[in-house]
Image: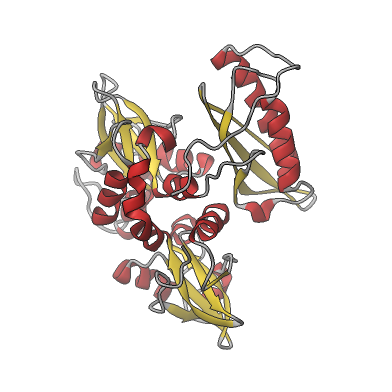
Amino acid sequence: MDISDIATREFVEVDANKRLGKVRAIFERENPKGIIVTEGGEYAGVITQKQLVQSHVEDDAKAGAMVRSAPKVERTADVRKVARVLVEGGTKVAPVFQGEELWGIITEDAILEAVLDNLDALTIEQIYTEDVITIEEDTNVGQIVNLLRKHSISRLPVLDDADGLTGMVTRHDIVDVVVRDMDKATRGDRSGEIERVLDMPVYDIMSSPVETAEPSDSVRDAVARMLERDFGGLVVTDDANHVIGIVTKTDVLRALTFTEEDHMDVQITNISLLDTISREDIRADISAVADKYGAMQVQHAHVRFHEHKEKLRGTPLIQCQIRLRTNKGQAAGSGEGYGAEMAFNVALDKLERNVLERKGVQADEEYRGQLLRKLGEL
C-alpha cells in the first residue's frame, strides 16, 4: 500500500518571513499537525506545534527561525516506509513530493485512518510502553515543566494517594496556563504572575477523568478513540486503576514498521542527530548485548536521541534512550553524553546492567538468540 490516496494537497503554508506570532495564531485557530514553510516559493521545512511549545523565540521573530528539516517522501512511497520516516524524524507531518515539486503533505493521522481496519491483528499489550513517568496531585507546574523537558515527553499521568490514576496533564495544558493565561486570573484567584503560576499544583489544571485502555484491548479500538477525540495517546491501566503503561499514536506507527527479518531492525527517533555512529553500528552493539542472554529474544528495538542546548567545544549534549521489547518484557537504558555516540554508549551500558538486574538473565556466550518480529504483516 502506498500513500498516493491518503496524502493531501490541503495544507497550511507560510512564508519564511512571516512573524512567528502569526504562526502561533494559526496553530491556535486551525490546529494543524504542522505548517509548511517556503522561502522564495521553494520548500524550506516545517514548523510543528511541539516546536512552538518548547520555544522561547519571541513573536516578532520570523518563521524561518523556527524551521526544522522534515524528511521528504515521494507521493507513491510505501505506507510502512513513510510511517518509519515520521517516527525517526520525530514529526507528525512530512512533505510529499512528486518529482521535484512539493505536492502536499502526509500526516500520522492519515496513515492511521488508512490502516485502521488492519489493526485488529494487534493488542495494546504488544506495543505499549511500560516505563511511564507519573506525578502526584500536589506536583507543581514548575516541576512538571522540568520533567517534560528532561524526558522529552508530552504528557504525565497524575496519581492520587492510593496510586490510582486520577488525571492527566499535557504539554498543551502547561502552555494554556503559562503562556496564554499569564495575564488572567486562574483557578483559586491566582494573579497569573509567573512565580505563582509555577507554584500551581497540577490538580488545578489536569484533565479528569482520563481515557484509558487495557492490555487486552485491540489497537484498532484504541486508535479509533484517539482519532475521534484527537488524543495523542491513552493510559494503560490494570483492574485496580493502576498505571502500567501508555500507548501513543507513535507506538502504533512504530508497530507498522515491524517486519520478520533475519536481523534486528532498530528504530531510531531523531536519526539526524547521528554523527560519528551509524544505524549499523547501533544495530550491531544492541545485538551484541542481546546475544549474551540466551533466555531473552528481542522482538523490537527503539533508540531515541534528544539534543540539549548545552555544548562542549561545539558538540551538543545528547540524551539517548534505548528500549527493547523482548519475550521477557521491556528492558530500557538511558544516558547522556556530548555527541550521539557517547550518549548511546552510556545508555547501552545502562541497558545491559538493567537487563541483568530486572530480568535475572544469565550470560550465555554460546547461545545465539533469534531476533524476530512477532507482529507479522499488516
Q: Can you say whether 130 is above or below 186 in the image? A: above
Relative to 329, 354 lies left or right: right
Q: Residue at x 44, y 30 (%)?
A: 130
Left or right of 247 in this view: 225: left
- The quadrant in which residue 361 appears is top right
Q: Please name whichever residue, 46 or 2, is drawn nearer the observer in this view of the structure.
A: 2
Foreground of the two, 195 or 173: 173
Q: Position of residue 40 (x, y in %)?
A: 58, 88
Q: Position of residue 283 (x, y in %)?
A: 70, 39
Q: Is residue 337 visible?
A: no
Q: Position of residue 328 (x, y in %)?
A: 51, 21
Q: Nearer the viewer, residue 109 or 219?
A: 219
* Residue 47 seen: yes
> Residue 60 placed where, x, y %?
48, 74
Q: Looking at the picture, does residue 197 appear above or below residue 46?
A: above
Residue at x 57%, y 70% (from the top left corner): 65
* Colouring: secondary structure
